[in-house]
Image (cartoon, helix red, strand yellow):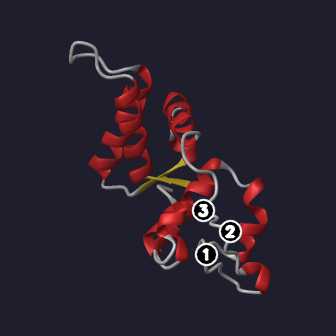
Amino acid sequence: MPQIHITDIEAAINHWRALAPATGGVALAPALAALAEVYGRMAFARLEAIDEAQLPAPAMAAWLAWYQTQPDTPCIAICSTSQGDDCCKGCGRSFAEVQHWLSMSPVQKRAVWHRITREGLALRFTRYAERAGAG
């Protein structure tokens, strides 16, 4: 089952905090409240990730709205899988991930993003970080 990492929940919370700050310092916007509830449960249980099926519909909708603001692909136009590499030296994705990217769900794509960011070995994170931008 694809999972959403807690850092993505945090990023979505920060996105919604900027879009819909608490009114009068008391009430949270519905999207923010839905994500905050999930984040609180994850923090209490010390979970790093949550199955997408466990995300309540309002939290998933808020997360997907945040997801739409993120770069879709980690590609930096230096693809070594086309040269026969099992793992792309440019973006860090596997050959299968590159081939099936368009059919992957947002949660699956973010799991790949999380892994390649954590590994930090691809050129997008080292030599060509400026080309990759803020992805």
Decide if residue 2 is in sight here. Answer: no
* Front in this rendered view, residue 4 or 87: 87
* Front in this rendered view, residue 40 or 15: 15
Residue 59 image position (x, y, % from top left):
48, 33
Q: Secondary structure at mark 3?
A: loop
* Front in this rendered view, residue 134 or 57: 134
Q: Secondary structure at mark 1?
A: loop
Residue 129 image position (x, y, % from top left):
48, 68
Q: Residue furthest left?
A: 25
Q: Which mark is residue 90?
A: 1
First in sequence: mark 2 or mark 1? 2
Q: Name the residue at 70% across, 84% down.
A: 86
Q: Which mark is residue 77?
A: 2
Figure quadrant of residue 120: bottom left
Q: Name the residue at 51% across, 33% down.
A: 56
Q: Is residue 72 left or right of residue 125?
A: right
10 Å neighbourhood of mark 2: few (<14), some, or many (≥20)?
few
The answer to whether the residues at label 2 and label 1 have Cβ atoms under 8 Å apart is yes
Which residue bears the numbered disc 3? 74
10 Å neighbourhood of mark 1: few (<14), some, or many (≥20)?
many
